[in-house]
Image (cartoon, rainbow, N blue to C red):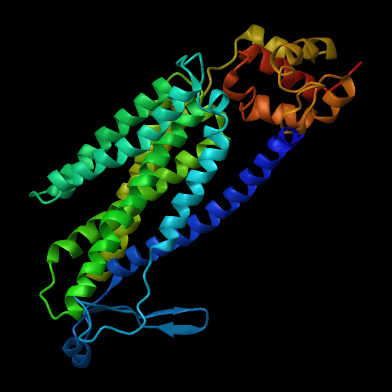
Amino acid sequence: MMAAYLPYALEWANMLLRWAHVVTAIAWIGASFYFVFLDSSLSKPADPDLVAKGVDGELWAVHGGGFYNPQKYLVAPRQMPANLHWFYWEAYSTWLTGFALFTVLYLFNAATFLVDKSVHDWPARAAIAAALGFLVAGWAVYDTICRVFGPRQHGDLIVAGCLLVFVAFASWLACQLFAGRAAFLLVGAMLASAMSANVLVWIIPGQRRVVAQLKAGQPVNPLDGWRARQRSVHNTYFTLPVLIAMLSNHYGWLHSGPHNWRVLVLLMLAGALIRHSFVARHKAGVLGRRAPWEFAGLGTALLVGLAVWMAPSPPSAAAIAVAGQPASYAQVRQVIDQRCALCHNAQLQNKGVALHTPELLRQQAQAVYQQSVVLKLMPFNNATGITDDERAVIKRWFEAGAPVD
């Protein structure tokens, strides 16, 4: 009896975890964006009292009817305050809710969500192990790149180049092993895990060591501050690539094509370039320089080029002639029975949708059209092998008023 309610319970868990994940991610990204902006927008204080206190930069801002004057100390104030706010639970909560959502949605349904037999035919358990290994290996490779190349001359550029190559390889590999939707999500989760690990492994421990050294009157190790800043900057550049990878699961046409890994790499690169433009803009404003909008322009050009590259070929004269003819119920019924009824019938009603009678199909016509024609999300992972011509039949039937007689 309880097993009958398991899919319903998982749907509730999916919804609540997704809600919590979005809320915590907003809190984390908002704090990250604000502090990157703040760090890049600080001006040297003109007040000698602030200089004497050790203030290295300040910013005046107005928001919500009030004036604010945040200040940054070169190392730390002479006396540590009693109440010191730490920013880390936002990062941890985002990862925990995200991994829980990944578990409920993908790992519990690995045979459907992770495995696409037309891409790579392997057991669900192997796919689960590989997906988890992807997250662990992603952090190990990223962290190694940072530790080996970061301290070198021009280390930031070397690290950026290595990460571009690594993310491109990871995108290619994921798209060879997993269903397209899962592959995009996994690459995004790999970067998001690295972001959280940066906070857990380097940023917060380094800051705790600095506070302990200051309280003990010991000299501060500058490596902790340098590494924390390096990883914080990396996190802000990862943000937009991670977000587009997470959002991509709503757009089947992004991850269902034969060149899906290239699509993912270009989307992520465009996001990183646009983010860099805004990060550099904050610094340029303080220094009185021109804002480097060319990076945002390049990112936008990548998106435009990607849209042009992915545009469908113009239909042939024969296809245009067929498209102008409405599809009958008998035609769409054949498509539904072959491609959709496997999961939407009297016995199995995935997502509460059944399509085995004319009345039910008419009732769900809008959803069928949206999911199978507009978004191309259904059949899931195209498990039943629906063709573009069959999607066109659904389109012509829906546009004809979804007749059932």
Q: Is residue 108 above or below residue 201?
A: above
- Residue lying farthest to the bottom in this orientation: 49
Q: Is residue 358 above or below residue 364?
A: above
- Seen in the picture, residue 256 relative to 70 is either above or below; the reply is above
Q: Position of residue 48 (x, y in %)?
A: 18, 91
Q: Residue at x 53, y 21 (%)?
A: 312
Tell which residue pokes out farthest to the left in this image: 153
Q: Is residue 20 left or right of residue 205?
A: right
Given the current orientation, which residue lies at the most extreme right position? 405
Q: In the image, what residue occupies the spot 41% across and 48% down?
A: 240
Residue at point 48%, 62% (across, down): 27
Q: Please state if 225 lies on the left or on the right of 282 as rendered.
A: left
Image location of residue 90, percent across then percent down: 44, 61
Image quadrant in which the C terminus is located:
top right
Which image quadrant: the N terminus?
A: top right
Relative to 180, residue 230 above or below: below
Q: Is residue 54 in sight in this rendering? A: yes
Q: Residue furthest front?
A: 1
Total tally of numbered discs in the picture? 0
Residue nearest the observer in this picture, 158 or 19: 19
Q: Position of residue 329 (x, y in %)?
A: 84, 14
Q: Quadrant of residue 331?
A: top right
On the question of residue 401 being in view, the answer is no
Quadrant of the rendered image containing residue 202: bottom left
Residue drawn where x is 18% and y is 49% of the image: 156
Residue 266 horizontal/vertical position (percent): 37, 34
Location of residue 242 (image quadrant)? top left
Nearer the observer, 239 or 101: 101
